[in-house]
Image (spheres, rainbow, N blue to C red):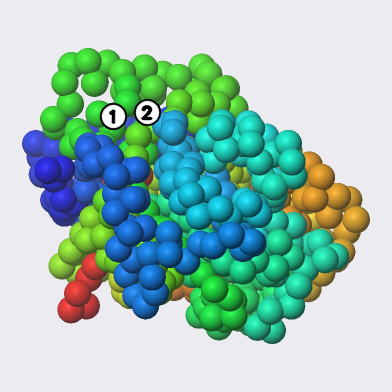
């Protein structure tokens, strides 16, 4: 049984800790008394996913019959699965989504269902390449469905979207007699009906993710879509190892590292100085990581989602006694919105101010008005997947960083024919995405008194509204606060402050 997460207090015997800095690590000593929040150690894969899926399909939760009893000849079935952002980092093959899909297709074939389509629910995220699609669904499924045009990717700007429950959604899914939702994730927020929102139109997503949207608006949209269709879901809770097997020691406590581990860590630190950031990013992303199955549930989306979210919560939760004045954290090498690309300043900021800051059960780890110190040397370079983000960074932010100032430019980007072409025909994220990422960081910006980037480019930090520091010691001199916390991530623990 892997050890759960815990809080460790730095003493005079604590060795330097590994702070993750994108595609690399730095060795950092912390002041005495710093509270270090460690996530649970990853679980070793043990359960056969296919067996678990068969059991779940035969014994669904919530109202409804087993999937085999719901399939019949002449039926139109749409299998909806998540894109590459559904589980980060990428999984070792075979992908969990592909294994689930194969089990569903086996039942459909036995029932005499001939009309089956597979739809990747990608929302405003980029199109997957054919190689990525083949990895997601498996080579056999890809070879069977892609050539006949039944392996599709949702286009939020398509002209043939169909209105359902007050929203316009993918036509193939809207026309299905039965929708089978497949989600494999390590993120609590992506359970239940959440994936259905990624089938909506650009306009619907702009409404529920815009600056004036209520926090629960996107969930309500997904629930409305689910209620208007016949939906059966298979959900898999994953405990993903954030690093390749040869770097698995980074999941351990530093004082438990072997001599070999220490040598490899030294090599990683050296690589930061001599290997270009793009090359390091490719190295980290090319090796897929293992993912252990925590739970599998099938049936009604709400009931299955509740089971899977509960398993993820139980695994990720770390109790912390009190808030801190200053929170220090690093950033991982990959963002859910940057799979297949290197990090850019906007993605790095989102990892810190949305993912890390927001990983709590209701009360942030850092107190209101406190400071957040982030390690990262992300240069102002943008991958071809993020063309609109590059222009957002260079053209929008210099004219004003407030939500209202940024939002005033969103429609201009969204209506640009070139951005739309890149989203529809190439592998670029939709032009609205950088705006939505910026809005998601607003709660952190309102909560925090200051944000300081250690090792960051000063011009980049200034553009984002941050301050830059050369070292942690320099950053600590720039802030007020008696208590210091370090969120030791990735993986990011789910902080529970209980009585605070």
What's the residue at 37%, 77% (across, down)?
Answer: 63
| Residue at point 70%, 56% (across, down) | 154
Q: On screen, 309 above or below 454?
A: below
**Location of mark 2 (residue):** 244
The image position of residue 67, as x and y in percent, is 43, 62
Q: Is 78 above or below relative to 99?
A: below
- Depth check: give the residue in front, 50 or 267: 50
Which quarter shows the N terminus? top left
Give the position of the C terminus as an image quadrant: bottom left
The x, y position of residue 367, in whole percent, is 32, 71
Residue at 15% across / 67% down in the picture? Answer: 321
Mark 2 secondary-structure assignment: loop
* Callout 1 crowding tier (Cα within 10 Å): few <14, some 14–19, many ≥20: some
User: Disc number at residue 107?
Assistant: none
- Taking the spot 61% from the left edge, 69% from the top edge, the residue there is 177
Outermost residue, right side:
417
Q: Are marks 2 and 1 in contact (CB under 8 Å)?
A: yes
Q: Quadrant of residue 84?
A: top right
Where does the image place residue 211, in percent across and percent down from the top left?
64, 76
In the image, is 92 to the left or to the right of 347? left
Label 2: few (<14), some (14–19) or many (≥20) C-alpha neighbours in 10 Å: many
Q: Is residue 149 left or right of residue 28?
A: right
Name the residue beneath numbered marker 1. Answer: 248
Residue 392 visible, this orientation:
no
Question: Which of the 4 image quadrants contains residue 338?
Answer: top right
């Amino acid at each position: 049984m892997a050890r759960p997460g815990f809080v460790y207090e730095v003493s005079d015997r604590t060795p330097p800790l590994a702070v993750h800095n994108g595609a690399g690590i730095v060795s950092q000593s912390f002041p005495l008394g710093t509270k270090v929040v460690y996530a649970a150690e990853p679980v070793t894969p043990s359960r056969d996913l296919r067996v678990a899926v068969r059991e779940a399909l035969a014994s669904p939760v919530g109202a409804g019959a087993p999937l085999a009893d719901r399939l019949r000849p002449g039926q139109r079935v749409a299998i909806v699965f998540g894109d590459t952002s559904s589980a980060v980092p990428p999984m070792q093959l075979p992908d969990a989504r592909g294994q689930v899909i194969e089990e569903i297709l086996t039942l459909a074939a036995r029932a005499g269902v001939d009309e089956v389509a597979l739809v990747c629910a990608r929302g405003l995220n980029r199109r997957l390449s054919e190689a990525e699609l083949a990895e997601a669904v498996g080579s056999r499924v890809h070879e069977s469905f892609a050539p006949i045009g039944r392996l599709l990717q949702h286009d939020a700007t398509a002209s043939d979207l169909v209105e359902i429950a007050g929203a316009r959604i993918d036509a193939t899914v809207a026309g299905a007699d039965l929708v089978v939702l497949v989600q494999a994730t390590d993120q609590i927020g992506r359970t239940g009906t959440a994936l259905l929102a990624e089938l909506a139109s650009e306009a619907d997503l702009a409404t529920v993710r815009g600056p004036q949207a209520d926090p629960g608006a996107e969930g309500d949209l997904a629930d409305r879509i689910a209620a208007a269709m016949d939906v059966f879901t298979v959900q898999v809770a994953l405990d993903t190892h954030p690093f390749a097997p040869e770097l698995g020691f980074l999941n351990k406590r530093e004082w438990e590292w072997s001599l070999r581990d220490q040598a490899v860590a030294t090599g990683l630190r050296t690589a930061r100085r001599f290997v270009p950031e793009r090359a390091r990013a490719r190295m980290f992303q090319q090796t897929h990581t293992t993912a252990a199955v925590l739970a599998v549930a099938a049936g009604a989306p709400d009931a299955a989602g509740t089971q899977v979210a509960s398993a993820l919560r139980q695994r990720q939760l770390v109790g912390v006694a009190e808030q801190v004045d200053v929170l220090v954290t690093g950033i991982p090498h990959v963002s859910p919105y940057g799979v297949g690309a290197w990090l850019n300043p906007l993605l790095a900021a989102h990892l810190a101010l949305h993912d890390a800051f927001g990983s709590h059960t209701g009360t942030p780890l850092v107190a209101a008005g406190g400071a957040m110190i982030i390690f990262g040397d992300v240069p102002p370079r943008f991958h071809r997947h993020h063309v609109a983000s590059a222009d957002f960074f260079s053209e929008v932010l210099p004219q004003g960083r407030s939500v209202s100032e940024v939002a005033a430019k969103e429609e201009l980007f969204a209506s640009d024919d070139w951005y739309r072409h890149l989203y529809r025909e190439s592998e670029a994220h939709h032009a609205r995405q950088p705006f939505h990422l910026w809005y998601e960081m607003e709660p952190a910006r309102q909560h925090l008194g200051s944000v300081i980037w250690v090792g960051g480019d000063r011009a980049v930090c200034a553009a984002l509204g941050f301050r830059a520091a050369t070292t942690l010691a320099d950053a600590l001199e720039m802030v007020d606060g008696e208590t210091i916390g370090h969120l030791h991530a990735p993986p990011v623990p789910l902080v529970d402050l209980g009585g605070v």
